[in-house]
Image (cartoon, rainbow, N blue to C red):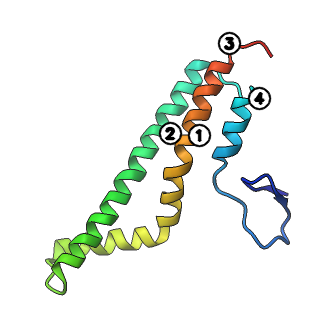
Amino acid sequence: MDVRSEGETGGAGRASPPERFAGDLFLQLARRGWLVLEPAQAQRVIGELERTLDEVRSRLRKLELSRKLRDASGDDVAPDVDRLVVDAVFAGQLNSDSWERALVELPKYIEALRIAGRNAGRPR
């Protein structure tokens, strides 16, 4: 069985694939006090997630820049620019949906972990 972000569950015969992200679930668990981390541990994970979010933003900026360069230069593209465009567009086509989804979901994870770190001091 897998879990969907909307709370729906499904098995192998279901038509929709499992979600890659669970930001809403993490936020819900943290807000209810069910996700608890020691503050130092939460900070370490938050730092890693923030670096990941920065990398995702950087890759999406490169993809957008490569599209603009390609549009601006038309058929007259320098080889180094063409290589950047081809690499970025190829990577973007493979990962664009995931990167854009990560831009939405990673901040939810970060907020959930901040709450989880504060939950460590609360009685359960």
At label 2, counting other C-alpha atoms closer than 10 Å, the crowd grade (few under 14, some 14-19, many 20 or more) is some
Tell me the CA gap for discs 3 and 4: 13 Å
**Residue 101 point in image, percent of width and height:** 54, 57
Q: Nearer the viewer, residue 114 or 84?
A: 114
> In percent of the image, x 45 and y 38: which residue is there?
50
The answer to whether residue 86 is left or right of residue 82 is right
At label 1, counting other C-alpha atoms closer than 10 Å, the crowd grade (few under 14, some 14-19, many 20 or more) is many
Q: Are marks 1 and 4 in contact (CB under 8 Å)?
A: no
Residue that badge 4 annotates: 34
* Disc 3 residue type (three-letter): Gly
Label of residue 109 in the image: 1
For discs 3 and 2, the disc positioned in front in the rendered view: 3
Tell me the CA gap for discs 1 and 4: 14 Å
Position of the C terminus, as image quadrant, is top right
> In percent of the image, x 18 and y 76: which residue is there?
72
* Disc 2 residue type (three-letter): Leu
Q: Tag 3's secondary structure? A: loop
In the image, residue 110 above or below residue 60: above
Q: Are marks 3 and 1 in contact (CB under 8 Å)?
A: no
Q: Are marks 3 and 2 in contact (CB under 8 Å)?
A: no
Residue that badge 2 annotates: 49
Residue that badge 3 annotates: 121
At label 4, counting other C-alpha atoms closer than 10 Å, the crowd grade (few under 14, some 14-19, many 20 or more) is some
Position of the N terminus, as image quadrant, is bottom right
Tell me the CA gap for discs 1 and 2: 8 Å
In the image, residue 96 above or below residue 32: below
Q: Tag 4's secondary structure? A: loop
